[in-house]
Amino acid sequence: MNANEKPSPLPVGTSHRYEFHGRELTANIVFSIVVVLLASGISLGSIRAGLMPKSAFRADPDSAIIATKAELAQSSADANVCLVGDSSCLINLDVATLQTAPGVRPINLGALSYLSLDSFGVLAGEYSKGRTAPKILLTVHPDCLRTAADSPAHRGVLEGALGESKVIQLRPNNPLSEMLGLEDLRTRLVDRWVPEPLKGAMGARYGFTENIQSELKSRLGTMDETGRFDPKTNSGSAEYRLAQRIKPEAQKFLTRLPKDARIRVLISPVPKSHARKDHEGTVREIRQELETALKAEAPSWELPLILPDDQFGTVTHLLPDAAKQYSREVAKRLAEWK
């Protein structure tokens, strides 16, 4: 529209009208493309030059937990016993309580059941580097032992956190964004500067993924359960067994550790209302099979396999006070483990 041309009247009820001309629209599109390419060039160049920080692993709580456990595994020089396993290890074993036992200095590398037994071995192996006869306490819930498959994506997060492969994100990636290096910009900088809020009870307890990381470090790997177990809801099957994948993974677990590693196995408890009548006998058989596969030390530690419902946040996790109580019993065994 030239300066002498009068604009056409607006329809009744319309306050504004935007008119775009080909030249202006093209300029805007070209400018946007240039900005994207410039950001891409800066991102890729900074990564290749080693100027960009590593991934923050703050896009989701799972990544935050796994990456922090990898960091703790590589920086646990003062610990003399490694706790490793699924989320029942992460939540049920309170390091501060365990430390009250004479001579017990644990590090809790418990992660998530999405990882395989072999992945737990990877973390234990990182802890064991440079140590003589390291003590490894594998703590898993019966649910973890019957799962048919692990999650390759979660394993990818672990390997990325340890620097063994390219970092894998659990959130969906845009292929074009990844090709241009913008996904790296997002994971290395944006996730580090812009906190990712958590939802529900976990959000109320921790707020952001960054807070999960900082608290895990300050508590040497322990995390609190934020839910509340309701026996009226469907808690899944209580029929436990050892999945076919477990024994082969146990062999891989052993290959991650030095020959003189000392291993013990702990099976986490379940709520009373969830347990079958034969639960304790079944779990002891499962534990024996796992101990044999891992060449674990004997005799087995006889700790509670069933606890009252009101001590649980979920079928697999104890509430904080119950976790401290359970940890006091574990601490006694650790103090006797000479």
Image (cartoon, helix red, strand yellow):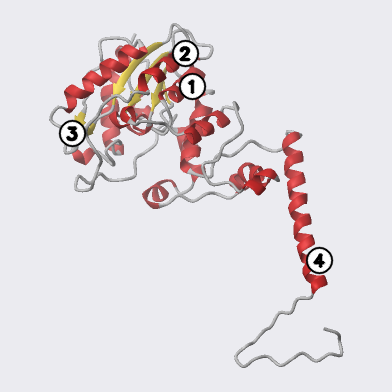
**Crowding near the residue tagged with mark 3, few <14, some 14–19, many ≥20 C-alpha atoms within 10 Å:** some
Q: Amino acid at mark 3?
A: Ala
Give the alpha-carbon distance from disc 4 to disc 2, as whole Å: 60 Å
Give the alpha-carbon distance from disc 2 to disc 3, as whole Å: 34 Å
Q: Secondary structure at mark 1?
A: helix
Per the image, the residue denoted by label 4 is 27
Considering only vertical position in the picture, is 239 above or below 84? below
Give the alpha-carbon distance from disc 3 to disc 1, as whole Å: 31 Å
Per the image, the residue denoted by label 2 is 255
Considering only vertical position in the picture, is 3 above or below 334? below
- Percent across and percent down for residue 196 are 52, 49
Q: Amino acid at mark 4?
A: Ala
**Is residue 77 visible to us here?**
no
Of marks 3 and 1, which one's residue comes earlier in the chain? Answer: 1
**Total numbered labels placed on residues in the image:** 4
Q: Residue at x 19, y 30 (%)?
A: 306
**Crowding near the residue tagged with mark 2, few <14, some 14–19, many ≥20 C-alpha atoms within 10 Å:** some
> Of residues 22 and 338, which is closer to you in this image?
22
